[in-house]
Image (spheres, rainbow, N blue to C red):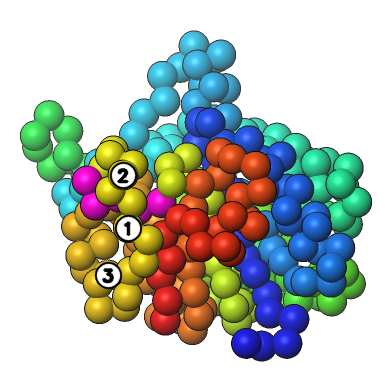
Amino acid sequence: MRENPLTVVKVGGGAGIDPRGVCADVAAWASGGQPIVVVHGASDRANRLSTAMGLQPRFLTSPSGHISRYTDPQARAIFVQAAHEANEEIVALLRGLGAAAIGLTGERSSLTAVRKQVLRAIVDGRTMVVRNDYSGKITAVDGDSLRSILASGQVPVVPPLARSESDGLLNVDADRAAASIAAALGAESLMIFTNVPGLMSRYPQENSLVPRVDRDQLDQALDWAQGRMKRKVLSVQQALDAGVRRVALADGRQSHPLLRAFSGEGTWFNA
């Protein structure tokens, strides 16, 4: 194992995840001198903000079965607000626990992306073309800035937003963002915390949790994955292909989720 190995932690933004549990472990980790980057989602917060404004959150299902948020201009504004609020909350929690956390929002964004100009989605059984979506594909990670922050003993906290020169801030998949950052920084471990125990072979039956997936089982893992879990498994594959040694999909709804995962809970993917 590398000296002072870097860990990238992704805090899910789905319903039921309390970031306080992850933050407590992250703060303890950082106080021990271990470098750690936090990436977070904002899905449930964006849903609640939309509902409060009288708008129904909408989602797209691709022909291959991947589910993503439909981010038209109005939904983009709501998502950006939700991501900033979630970032502020996590930074405040970490600072309250003694960690020197810094939120990378706005001009501090560490991610660059290009807008997906055309999306294909299944609507009423037909494939439709969507052109006014403001989600993005990550093209670059500002690794130098992140390394500088880590070297100063701080914890970078990265929202699911990326800068685009022509289209402003874009909604990016937080799991993909975490995988991209882990790859760019040569992380030892990527920990993805969600609102389920891990990958299940017979979702939603939690007793079908798969504790370990070897590299030659990734295609099988994609078959097992349902809905949003498909993107998580693809993010796992992205990280492993880039040299990250191990990735965990684990439960973020409980106390000390980071410690529990490192003790063997969840689903572990090894290079």
| Relative to 43, residue 173 above or below | below
Quadrant position of the N terminus in the picture = bottom right
Q: Nearer the viewer, residue 38 or 246?
A: 246
Q: Nearer the viewer, residue 28 or 110?
A: 28
For marks 2 and 3 on the same chain, the one whose residue lies earlier in the sequence: 2
The magenta region covers 198-202
Amino acid on which disc 2 is placed:
Asn
For marks 3 and 1 on the same chain, the one whose residue lies earlier in the sequence: 1
Please report the residue visible at 55 percent of the width from the left and 67 percent of the height from the top.
190
Residue 7: image tag: none
Q: Report if residue 87 is visible in the image.
A: no
Q: Which residue is mark 3?
A: 218
Residue 207: image tag: 2
Residue 78 coordinates in the image, percent (x, y): 57, 30
Q: Main secondary structure of the magenta part?
A: loop
| Relative to 109, residue 47 above or below | above
